[in-house]
Amino acid sequence: MRDESVNIAPPPACAKDTESPLWEEFRAGRGAGWFEVVERPGQPSALRISSFTNNPAWRSVPRKIEPLKEYRLEAQIRGSGRLMLQWIRLEKRWDSMKEGRSRLVEVPLGEVCSSEVSDDSWNDAAVGEVAPREATHCRIFLEAVGSALAVEFREVFLDGLGRDSLAIHYCHAGYHPRASKTAIIQLKEQAKGGRFILIDENGRQRFEDDMELIEKPAWGRSFRLADFSRFQEEGNFALAVEVGGRRLRTKFFPIRDDIYTRLSELTLDWFGTQRCGTAVPGWHERCHADDGAVRKKGEVRKFCDATGGWHDGGSYAKLTQHIWIAIHSLTHLHERGGGREDDARAGHPIALEECRWGVEYLLKIATRDGRFASGVIGRREQEYIGPPEEETDNVPESGDERTVEPECSWTAAALCSYALANYARVVEKMYPSLAKRCYAAAERTFAALEKSKAPDDPINLHAAAALLCISLWRARGKEQYREECSWRALSILQKQTDEGIFAAGEQYLRRLALPAGERIRLPDMTDPDTGMEYAPAPFLYLHALLCYLERSIDDALALEIRGALDKFFVRIKQCTDVSPFGQMGEWTLADDAVSFPSMPRGNNTYLLACSYMLAKASALLNRRDLANTAQRQLEWVLGRNIRGACMVCGAGHKELGAYYTLYAAIEEHANGYQPGGVVNGITGGDGRELPLNFPCLDIRSPKEARSGLDVDPRTNQYWMPNCAWFILACGEITKMHNANTQHTGG
C-alpha cells in the first residue's frame, strides 16, 4: 500500500474544475466495455472494464458475446505514477446472508502488469497481456504519486477527443461554393498565432489566411477558426494548418455546387435497403410477407394486410410516427430536383418510386376514423436477431405474424396525412388513382380534427394539424383549409412566452428552468409535450409556421409570425453559442446548458431538423446569420464535430468502425455498413457514469467491434428520422445557396 502522499486523480463524474486539461479522459466511455469507477481513498484509483460488451441496462438485444483474448491499453501520461492492468474472473456465488440471492466475487488471476512514468512532460505508457483462459474481466489501475496525473488514452474509442495535440475538424463531404466554409482547429496545449492554406490536387496553394481564436475553450482544449468562405472555386482541396510550430493537413475534400444533392441521393439508396415485404438484392430475401395480426392480450383477433413500408433503422419494426417524415423528405427530394431518373421506370424519378413504397403501406394501415395503426412490431415475447426473412414463416394467417399495433395519436395521424397530401399533389398526373386514395385519407383526418379541435390542444397537435391544412390548401386551394390553418397558427402563436419560446405548458417551462443535474434525471426527455425538443420531430411548431409563411407571405398573420420567429431565433442563438462548433446545444432556460444533451438516440435528429428549418427561415426572413447556423448543424453530422467523425455512412474519411442494425446479424453485413445511413450521433454523458458534457460516440475500430450488434445503439444506430431530416436539410441548404450569390463566414 502506498503512503499518504498518494493523490488519486478524480473520476470525471466527480471533477469540479472542468477547465483543467483532459478532465474527461480519465474514464472515457463504454467503447471498450462497461467501466465502473472504484474509489478507494489512499489507494490506487481503478477502472473496472468488462471484457464482455453486453450491458442489459442499455442494450435490449441479447446475443453471443466472445470474451477478449488479449488486451492492451496505450496512453500518454504527464506526472509521476503508474498505469496497471490485472486480469480477474467474476464468479457468481451464493450469499448465505441474503436468502435467494447470489453475489459477484472477484478472483485475481496473476500479478499486476504495470508501466511507470515520472516526468512533468507527456510520456508514453502501455500495459497489455494475453488473457488467462479463465479470465472474464481486466481491471485497469491508474496510480498517481505526489500529484494527480493527467492521462490521455491512445485508443480513439477511449480518448473521446483524439490522441493528437493538434486536430482539424471539417466537413468531410465537402462544401458548396457559395456556402460559408470553415474548419475548427483544436489544440491540446496553448499556442500563439497560426495560419492556414488551401491546397489543390496539384499541390498549388490557392488560398491563405490567419486563423481566428475562438473565445470558447472547452473539454481541456482551445480552438481556432479557419474561414475560407471567400474562396468559391470548384475542385478538390486540402486544408493545411501551422500553429505553434506544428503542422497538419486534412484529406482532400470537394467544393462543388451539387454536393448536397449527391449526399441526398446516397441516403435515398439507404431507404431502398430498408424495404420490407420484398427481396432487396444484396441485402435480404423477401421478408415479412405475412404482416400482420391484430392481437389482444396476446391472442390473435384478426389478420390484415400490413405488408410493405421500411424497416426502421436499427430494427425490423415499422413505426408510423416516423414514416411520415420519410415520405415527406423523399417528396421534397424530388421537388428540389434530386432523385436520379431511372430509365427502367419510364422516366419516373427514383425518389417518388421509393416514396410510393411507404405510401402504399401507410394507406393499408389507415383506419376509418382518420388515423393509422401505430406500427408493426415483432412478438413482444420474442427478441429476434437474424435475417429479416427468417423472423416469420412469410405465410399469411399461420399464427406467427408480427403484431399490428393500435391506432396512433392524432398528432401522428395529422403528420401522416400531411405527407400523403403532399405526395398526392406531386403524383396526381402520374398516378391519379393513388393520389385520389391519398387525398381521401388526408381529408378523413382533416374532418376529424376540425370537428374535435380545441384551443388547449397540445402545441404539437396544433402544428401537425396546421401542416395538414397547408398541404390540402396548396393542393386543393379551398378557403376552408386556409381558415383552419390560420386558426391553428394563431393557437401556436398564443403559446409563445416572453422569453421567445413556444411552451407546451407550465410543466414544460418548469422543466426548462431546472438545473442540469435535475434536468438530466427526468423521464420523457424526448416528449415535447412534457419534456424537451429533441426527437423525432423537433420544433414541429416552427416547421408549421415557416410553411405558413411560404404559402401566405404578405397577410397580417404572416407579419405576426415573422415577429414571433425573430424573438424565437434569439433563443436559438443562445443555444448555438454554448459550443465552439456552433451546433445546437441543450434546449433550456437555465444558465448551465451543455453542448450535448444526454439522449437515448443521440442528437443528430435534433441538429438536422434545426438545419432544415433554419435554412428555410434564412430565405423567408432574409436572415444571412441563420444560413450560417443552418450550415453548422449539417456540417456537425458530416465531420465538423468534436470527435472528428462523419456520421453518415459512406460520406467521410473517418467513419464509425461498426453500425448498429439488425442487418449486422447477416454474415456479409456484420459491421452494419449501409452507405447513406445516418446514425443517432453524439450524445452527452448522463452525469453518473460520464460527465454531463462528455461527447459520447462509439468509434471503435472494426477489430474491436466485431459486429454492428456490439456497438452502442444510442450513438451508432441508424434511424429513419435521422435519414429523413438529413435529406430535408441537404435540399433546403442547396436551395438557400443557389438563391444567394455569396455567403459570409462564421
Image: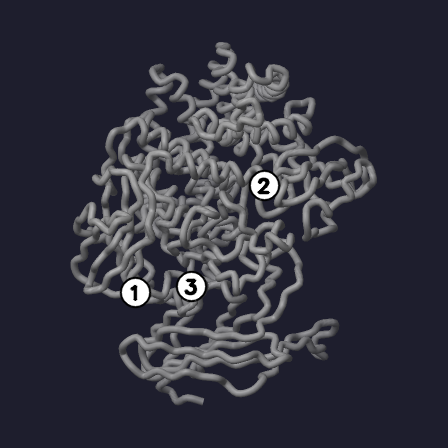
Q: What kind of residue is marked 1?
A: Ser
Residue at figure coordinates x 52%, y 81% from the top left: 86
Q: Which mark is residue 469?
A: none
Horizontally, is 257 left or right of 473 in the view? Answer: left
Q: Which residue is mark 3?
A: 156
The residue under the point 50% across, 52% down is: 715
Question: Which residue bears the numbered disc 1?
Answer: 165
**For residue 428, what is the image quadrant?**
top right
Q: N-terminal of the two: label 3 or label 1?
A: 3
Residue at screen point 59% across, 62% down: 55
Question: Which x, y percent locates residue 720?
Answer: 54, 40
Q: Is residue 529 visible?
A: no
Q: Which residue is mark 2?
A: 273
Work out whether 258 lies above or below 119: above
What secondary structure is marked by label 1? loop
Contact between labelled residues 2 and 3, with CB atoms less than 8 Å apart: no
**Whether label 3 touches label 1, CB < 8 Å:** no
Relative image position of residue 313 (x, y in whole percent): 57, 44
Residue 657 percent coordinates (x, y): 49, 57
Please, what is the three-letter code of the amino acid marked with disc 3? Answer: Val
- The picture places residue 600, in percent across and down from the top left corner, at 52, 51
Q: How is the image coloured?
A: one colour
Say if residue 241 shows up in the picture. yes
Mark positioned earlier in the residue sequence (3 or 2): 3
The local secondary structure at tag 2 comes to helix
Q: Residues within 10 Å of mark 2 (few under 14, many from 20)?
A: many
Which three-letter amino acid code belongs to the residue tagged 2? Thr
Viewer-nearest of discs 3 and 2 = 2
Q: CA distance from mark 1 to mark 2?
A: 40 Å
Q: CA distance from mark 3 to mark 2?
A: 30 Å
Q: Local crowd at mark 3 within 10 Å, few (<14), some, or many (≥20)?
A: some
Q: CA distance from mark 3 to mark 1?
A: 13 Å
